[in-house]
Image: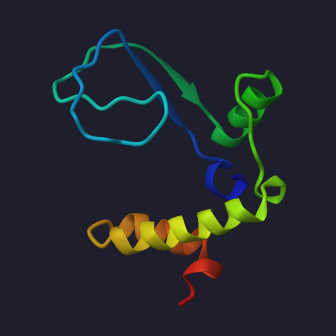
Amino acid sequence: MKKTYKGVSGYIYFAESVTDSGIEIRIPNAASSSTPVTVSDSEFISDAYEAILEAEEKGFISILRYCEIPEKMHDWIERTILKEYEEATNHPEYRHFLKGNFEDILSV
């Protein structure tokens, strides 16, 4: 988590309504619109890692760390990473991310 988010800044955008694009984005509480959306508010996040830890500390989210999960879930994660990599042939940027973060699993 630290490797991925530490020092990464960005914005969270808020919209009153969104026309669902129909594209499954698989990100909880996120939306993808098929038409332009009026942004009603935004929040700048200077360090995503620090914001995530703060949200955990305040009880807004729970983080299950890799070292705390059962072996069965480790196996599922490994299978999922391999499958995601295989299926991302048209997304070299995602493959680069996976290879850079899970080299031990993808060093085939």
Relative vertical location of residue 57 with respect to residue 79 in this rendering, above or below: above
Residue 55 appears at what percent x and percent y?
Answer: 73, 27
Nearer to me, 1 or 12: 1
Identify the image quadrant of residue 54: top right
Residue 14 appears at what percent x and percent y?
Answer: 42, 17
**Residue in the picture at 30% in, 32% down:** 32
Q: Residue furthest bottom?
A: 108
**Residue in the picture at 21% in, 32% down:** 21
Q: Answer left or right for 32 relative to 79.
A: left
Nearer to me, 27 or 71: 71
Relative vertical location of residue 14 with respect to residue 25 in this rendering, above or below: above
Identify the image quadrant of residue 58: top right
Q: Answer left or right for 28 relative to 1.
A: left
Residue 20 appears at what percent x and percent y?
Answer: 24, 26
**Residue in the picture at 25% in, 40% down:** 23
Relative vertical location of residue 42 with respect to residue 24 in this rendering, above or below: above
- In this figure, which colouring scheme has been used for the structure? rainbow
**Residue in the picture at 83% in, 54% down:** 68
Relative vertical location of residue 34 with respect to residue 5 in this rendering, above or below: above
Q: Residue furthest front?
A: 72
Q: Disc count in the image?
A: 0
Nearer to me, 36 or 18: 18
Residue 95 appears at what percent x and percent y?
Answer: 42, 70
Q: Residue furthest left?
A: 35
